[in-house]
Structures are given as C-alpha cells and as structure tokens.
Image (tube, grey):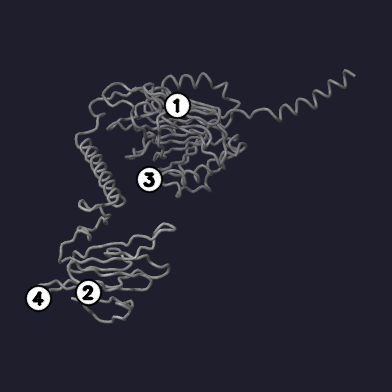
C-alpha cells in the first residue's frame, strides 16, 4: 500500500504540479546612458534586455510614478563580434545572428550601420563593416565546427580603430562562448567613448564560472557593461536601444535624479540613477514663452468669438420699440417701418398643433433682396429633399417720381402674383399675394393702399 502511494505521488502529483507552475521570469535588464535637458524636455538613451513587449519609461525621485515617456528606436553604429567556436554551431548561433541582422534592418532607423566580425584562434574575418543591414551577406555567417575559440582582443582593436559616425550611438555585442578578455586598451576606450558592451553568452553553463571576470569588468565599466546568457534565437533581439523623451517635472534650476524603468508582466527592472544639473538652459527661452502666451491668447480669442457667434445665431432678437421678434440679419423691424418702407409676410408652417402660426415678417431694407431656399435669402423657405437650393424671386427697389416702387423679378421657378403667372419683371402693389411652389407671401407697403 505504501509503495503504491509513493509511486502515485511521484508519477501523478509532480507532473501535474509542474504543468501548472508559473513560467520562469524573463531576464530583464535596463540601463540609462546619456541624458540631456533642453527647455524642460528630457532626452535619454536607454538600452533594454528582455522581451519585445517590455514597457520602458523614465522616472525621477522628484515625481510620483513614472514620467509620460515617448520612445523611438535609436540609430546605432552596431558592431556584432561572433566567437566562432565548435559550440557555436551546436547552439546554432550563426542562424540566430543571421536572424538578428534581418530584424535589425526592419526595426532600426535607416541611418543605422551594422558591422559583423567573426573571430577564432588565428584569424579574424570581417564580414561587413559599417554598412546598412540590408547589405550584410547573411549567407557568410557560418560557424565552423572545427574552429577553436579565441579571445576578442583583436576584434575589439578593429572596432577601436574604426571611424566614429556622427549622429549614431556606438554599441558592441560580444557573442561569445566564454572568452571575455578585451584588453586594458579596449576597456579604456570603452569607458572614454561611452560605448556599451553587451556580453551575450551562448554557453550558459559557464556563467557561474565567469562571475569574477564579469565583476572585474563591471568595476571598470559600470553600466556600460551588460552581461548575461539570454535566449539566443533568430526571432528575438537580445538588446533594444531607445531614445526616450519626457517632460521635466522641475520648472526651475536644480538637480534632477533620473533613472529608467522596465516592466514586463510582473517583472521589473530599474537602472542606476543619473543626476542632471538643470541650469538656466532648463527654462524655456524668452521667444518660446512669448509664442506660448500668444498661442494661448489666440485660442482664448477664437473661443470667445465662436461663443459670441453661437449666442447671436441661436438667441432671439426683438425690436426695442414694439417687442416683435426679428431675424439676426434684419436691421429694420417691419412693424416699425416708416411710411416709405415695405415688407413681406410669409405663412409660417411651423406652428404648434391646434394653433395658427404667426406669419414671418421681413422688412425690405436693401436695394435688392432674394427669396428662396438658399442661404442669404430674406425669407428662407424650407428646401425639399432631393431638390437643389435656389432663389425663387428677387425684389428690387426703384424710384418712380417721388415714390419708391418695388419690382418683382422671377429667378427660374414659376411665380404667381394674385394667381397670375409672372415670367418677366413686374411692379408690386401693396397687398399683392405671391406664391411659389408651396410657399405663399404677401407684399405690404406702408402708407400705400392697394388702389394706389
């Protein structure tokens, strides 16, 4: 019975527990390099080792929580140094490096340049030197099963002698089985030039043994050295470098303690802090402040103008003498017009149910007025669906002796005056009824009777 229970626990419980165990945490590291502040805008170079969906942000001790950060891929002068040894082919590192070159060509800015060196005992092969990623002969990246691993000193010397490219951040990826001797001259050059050295071990079993060597290198290089044994796979870049931008929480001069944060799921990583001194250059320039104030004033003026237009368009306008409602575009109240003025009455179809709607009144206070469905009409009629907007007729003021006469001018649609079709201009008399389509108007001239 006891034997049966033992085998049940061993062969059933432990496999099930392993199946539901949490996946291992990713190897997540972040480093913060150069950072500058210009007009309260922070720009920093950040390198991340971890999965592609890692979230990166800048943070300071002067602000609660991370800063709102925008990221773009940094243009690189990237040197890949491949330790061509027997274990290189076993781990298929050549296929991984070829895959990295393809991904770098897609992800890095077009100004970036890639170099690829392969070294082994007794030889150094330059496959490509400071060329675009698309020009690297990926077919020449091969591991030799008979090769013996060598120290990367000669490869580092070649990198050190290469010319620096303006506007590009130089970075070195050392893909090695365990040889880490870069020489004192190489270490001094890395420290003086600020070049990052990423040690990528494709033989992870040697990582505990190489601990003292890596500690000595880290003492000399600090955050310029990033070492580890990441997953060497063609579809995953081991390192990603970004230019991070954020707004400084300090508006005046002082010291700003800046660091970078990386988050991937429940895993977090934080870089070493970097202290920036904010002088007078951190404040916005006088011209920028003037532009900001002018932009703000223009925005306020545009908002006030729009508010006034909306209020005038939708608020009712009343005559100050008789209290009758007027259109915003009318300057003269039809009910208060002097003797020689005229106006039009239009049947208002928009009355409440059960009530007779009051007619719309518009004074003819211009030498020429339009009536129709188009914008700008003195009395605007309701347009019918599917029919183009147009003017129905015009009324022009003319002088006939000592009196002002009003002439109706048809504008295309059939116009009827007192039931008679009008096809040519004719004079109107007070009380005439004008009908166009479904709209009906009445012409009234103050002080003039219909008989006159």
In the depicted structure, whether residue 347 falls above or below residue 217: below
Give how far apart the Cα atoms at labels 3 and 4 are: 84 Å
Q: Secondary structure at mark 1?
A: strand
Name the N-terminal-most of marks 1 and 2.
1
Ranked by sequence position, the earlier of labels 2 and 4 is 4
- For marks 1 and 2, give the CA distance: 103 Å
Which of 117 and 199 lies nearest the eye of the viewer? 199
- Element type where label 4 sits in the image: loop
Q: Residue drawn 25% across and 70% down?
A: 443
Please identify, in this view, whether the residue under mark 2 or under mark 4 is nearer the observer: 2
Q: Which residue is mark 3?
A: 111
The numbered dot on residue 401 is 4
Circle 1 residue: 225
Determine whether 104 is above or below 8 in the image.
Answer: below
Work out which residue is located at the far left of the displayed protein and give it.
402
The x and y percentages for residue 343 are 23, 65
Distance from disc 2 to disc 4, alpha carbons, whole Å, reads: 18 Å
Rounded to the nearest angstrom, the CA distance separating label 3 from label 2 is 87 Å
Mark in front: 4 vs 1:
4
For residue 427, which quarter of the picture?
A: bottom left
Mark sitting earlier along the chain (4/1): 1
- Mark 4: few, some, or many residues within 10 Å (few <14, many ≥20)? few
**Regarding mark 3 in the picture, which secondary structure is present there?**
loop
């Amino acid at each position: 019975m006891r034997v049966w229970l033992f085998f049940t626990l061993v062969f059933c419980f432990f496999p099930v527990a392993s199946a539901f165990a949490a996946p291992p945490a990713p190897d997540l590291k972040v480093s913060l390099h150069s950072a500058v502040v210009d007009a309260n805008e922070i720009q920093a170079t950040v390198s991340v080792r971890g999965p592609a969906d890692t979230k990166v942000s800048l943070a300071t001790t002067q602000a609660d929580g991370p800063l709102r950060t925008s990221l773009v891929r940094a243009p690189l002068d990237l040197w890949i140094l491949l330790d061509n040894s027997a274990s290189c082919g076993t781990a298929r590192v050549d296929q991984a490096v070829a895959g990295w070159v393809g991904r770098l060509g897609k992800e890095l800015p077009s100004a970036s340049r890639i170099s690829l060196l392969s070294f082994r005992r007794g030889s150094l092969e330059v496959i490509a030197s400071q060329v675009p990623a698309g020009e690297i002969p990926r077919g020449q990246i091969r591991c030799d099963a008979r090769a013996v691993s060598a120290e990367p000193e000669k490869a580092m010397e070649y990198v050190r002698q290469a010319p620096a490219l303006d506007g590009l951040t130089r970075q070195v990826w050392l893909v090695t089985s365990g040889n880490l001797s870069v020489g004192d001259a190489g270490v001094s050059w890395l420290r003086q030039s600020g070049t990052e050295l990423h040690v990528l071990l494709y033989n992870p079993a040697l990582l505990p043994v190489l601990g003292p060597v890596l500690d000595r290198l880290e003492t000399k290089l600090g955050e310029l050295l990033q070492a580890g044994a990441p997953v060497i796979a063609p579809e995953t870049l081991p390192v990603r470098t970004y230019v991070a931008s954020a707004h400084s929480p300090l508006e005046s001069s002082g010291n700003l303690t800046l660091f970078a944060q990386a988050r991937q799921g429940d895993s977090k990583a934080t870089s070493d802090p970097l202290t920036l001194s904010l002088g007078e250059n951190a404040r916005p320039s006088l011209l920028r402040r003037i532009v900001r104030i002018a932009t703000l004033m223009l925005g306020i003026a545009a908002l006030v103008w729009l508010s006034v237009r909306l209020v005038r368009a939708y608020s009712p306008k009343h005559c100050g003498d008789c209290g009758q409602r007027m259109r915003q575009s009318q300057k003269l109240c039809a009910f208060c017009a002097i003797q020689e003025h005229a106006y039009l009455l239009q049947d208002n179809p928009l009355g409440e149910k059960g009530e007779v709607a009051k007619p719309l009144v518009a004074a003819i206070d211009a030498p020429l007025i339009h009536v129709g469905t188009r914008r700008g009409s003195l009395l605007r009629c309701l347009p019918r669906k599917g029919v183009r907007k147009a003017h129905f007729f015009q009324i022009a003021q003319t002088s006939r002796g000592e009196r002002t006469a009003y002439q109706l001018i048809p504008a295309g649609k059939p116009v009827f005056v007192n039931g008679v079709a009008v096809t040519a201009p004719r004079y109107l008399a007070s009380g005439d009824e004008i009908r166009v389509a479904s709209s009906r108007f009445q012409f009234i001239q103050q002080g003039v009777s219909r008989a006159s």
